Each structure stands twice: as C-alpha cells, then as structure tokens.
Image (cartoon, rainbow, N blue to C red):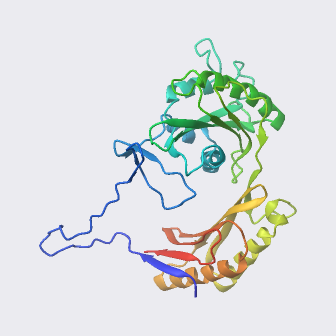
Amino acid sequence: MKTKKILLLGATIFFLSACGNLENGISNVNEGEKTSGGSITTGRVDNSAYQALMKDGQYQTSAARKLNAEKMTGGYNQQNFEDGLLRLSHETFPVDSYYFQEGQKIDEETLRSWLDRASDDNPDGLNPKDEKKPIIFQQLMEQDFIKEDGKTLGGISLGFAFNSVDYSGDEAVEISRDEIMANARKTVNAVLTRVRKISGLEKVPIMVGLFEQAAREDIRGGNYIYSAVSKDGGTTIDQFDRVTEAHVTLPVASGEKNNATQDGLNTKFTSFRDAIQGFFPELAGVTGSAYYVEDQVQAVTMSIYSKYYSKTEITSFTQFIGKQIESIFEGTSGTIEVQINSIDGPQAFIAKKVGEKEVISYVFN
C-alpha cells in the first residue's frame, strides 16, 4: 500500500506541564528568510512558487484588495483571474530570480475611477459614457516582482478582465470576442500610458494578460486569452500572443468535445466515479474540474460529498480512493486532488503531485 495516512487532531489542546510551565514547549517559529539586501521573505516549500516579501515582518496585502471579490462575477472567475496571471508571470519574472509582492503601485481610488464609466465628474473612466453601451472592461489587477536584493522593483504584471456578458443594465448583454479585443487594445494602451507616469514604473517590464470573464452561471470560470510584455517604457502594445488555457468541468456533458474528451481524462473520471459509487453507495455526488495549458492537463480537482460519518468509514473510504487514483489516473500529467466533504465540513484530502507515483492522504477529525 503506497498511500500514506496522516491523522490531523483538530481542536486538541496539549497541556505542556502540570504546573503550567510553558518553557518546555516547542517554540521553533520560522521567521522567514533574508534576501541579499536584508529583506525578509516567507520562504517556500514548493520550488515552483514565488517567495513573497514581507515588510516590517508582515505580509503586504494589495493596495486594491477589495476590488477582486467585488468586481469579478463568481468565485471561479476570481480564482482563475488571480492564479492565471501569476502563471503567465513566470516566463517574464522567473521564480528563482524574483520575489512576489501584492500590487502596491495602483491604489483603490485610482482603479475605481479607471473602471467606472467616463463622465464629466470622472474623465478618467475607461468604460463608455453612454449607459446604453455595455461595461466591457471589468477589472484590473496588479502583481509586483522584486529583484533578488529584495528591494528593487523588477517589473509588474497587469491582469485586465473583460466581460463576455454585461449585467450592468436591466438585461444581460452578451459581448463577442471581437468586441472584447477592440476594447482591450484601446484600454491596455490607455492604462500603460497612465501607469508609466507612476514613480518607479517608467521603464520596468510590464507583463499584460487579457482575461475573458465567464458568465455567472458558468461554473468553470473564465480564461486568459492573450498576453504581451511592454518593455523599455513602452506605452503601446501592437501585438498580443495567444494564450491557450482552458478550465473543463467533469464529467463532460454528453455530446460536448473538449480537451478532456480528446485525451481520455473524461473517461478516467467517469471510471473513477463509477468505481467509488459502486463500492461505497452512501455518496451524495462526485464532481470535478481540470485545468489545461497548451492542451496539457495541469491539475485535476475532484470533490466528493459523502454520507459517511464514523472514523472507520471515512478512513476506509479515503484509502480506497487513494488506490483508485494510483491505478485509474496512472500516467496522467498534472496534480490530482480529491476533497471529501460532508454537510458538517471537510472529512479528508487525497493528492498526487506531478511526476510522483505516491499518493498522500489526510483524514480530519
């Protein structure tokens, strides 16, 4: 049996000594790592992830952090928007050469004025003054990348989110890809012109990602469709590179064709679902999603809603799922993750990392 089982004891209090003396307790708190310039970082346990910089010992949140949840339509759009921009940044700002910091240069008030409609009171608005026209430019997100000294800004990434459906009026209005791109070309150049006037951003590389926000009812969320890099203080982008990424819901609807039907992932998912429902009938449902980049699956996430409650039931179920992942998804590129939940909350988590045969599992009390 290759599956590891780790039992997490939640809400358990350990008394360190009968007399209340805490000096014998373990207190090895990791206080981060230092850059060559003396700045503190979070450190990292995943070599494919950025280390984040901390200021005065604390993580710095975005200057406009509230806007993502407020402006993006649904959680999956928000997650895809944030995660996708970070992924696109890897090529321009490699994780081994740059540190990450939430956007600090463009403040919330400025962003709100840009995202609003143009008006006499708001000449900076980048959406149409005519309220009969749809809102296409929905959100702008900044991510900062700091050089190895931990102090010098090496560049920034800007994620532009555009609506495929506008809900600002009385009725939902669909927006074509051609309309999105016509708006994007003007909007990106206008924002670059303004951003280049901000202190520290005059000459640094700026990676730009164009995100097409999905409709509210689309549980897959949207995708990045184009990207580009502005260098040497440039204020215009004439050519965008196509981004090929896709979020696929599992199982795929009958008759639909996509990445998961072409590479056999959908068949693997249905085999997995049928196997666990056959041996463990007390399940409320099994759903999943897959993330593809350049037609290669990067991650498969599955959720199982169980009606099992005893510790032995959940443990046995978790072990069985781990073995099915080993066999059914053998040879599948990308991370495999399974979350087991009940109406009372999470019960277990199972995962297999990229390139590894071993499956890990966590059972929660």
* Relative to 212, residue 122 above or below: above
Q: State how many labels appear.
A: 0
The percent position of residue 259, horizontal first and vertical second, equals 81, 60
Which of the image's four quarters has the C terminus?
bottom left
Residue 229, given in percent of the width and then of the height, sits at: 69, 36
Q: Is residue 148 left or right of residue 138?
A: left
Quadrant where the N terminus is found in the figure: bottom right
Measured as percent of width and height from the top left, residue 308 is found at: 54, 79
Residue at image location 85% in from the left, 65% down from the top: 262
The relative height of residue 22 versus residue 182 in the rendered view (above or below) is below
Q: Residue at x 71, y 68 (%)?
A: 333
**In this view, which residue lies farthest toward the left?**
19
Q: Let me know if residue 303 appears in the view.
A: no
Q: Nearer the viewer, residue 12 or 331?
A: 331
Q: Residue at x 59, y 25 (%)?
A: 195
Residue 165 percent coordinates (x, y): 74, 38
Q: Is residue 239 above or below residue 122?
A: below
Quarter location, residue 173: top right
Judge whether 63 appears above or below 341 on screen.
Answer: above
Viewer-side residue, 238 vs 316:
238
Q: Mark yes or no: residue 299 visible.
A: yes
Q: Give the residue furthest to the bottom.
A: 1
Residue furthest top as drawn = 120
Pick whichever, 168 or 36, lies toward us: 36
Outermost right residue: 255
Classify residue 324 as left or right of residue 145.
right
Judge from the rendering whether residue 122 lies leftward or rightward of residue 256; answer left or right.
Answer: left
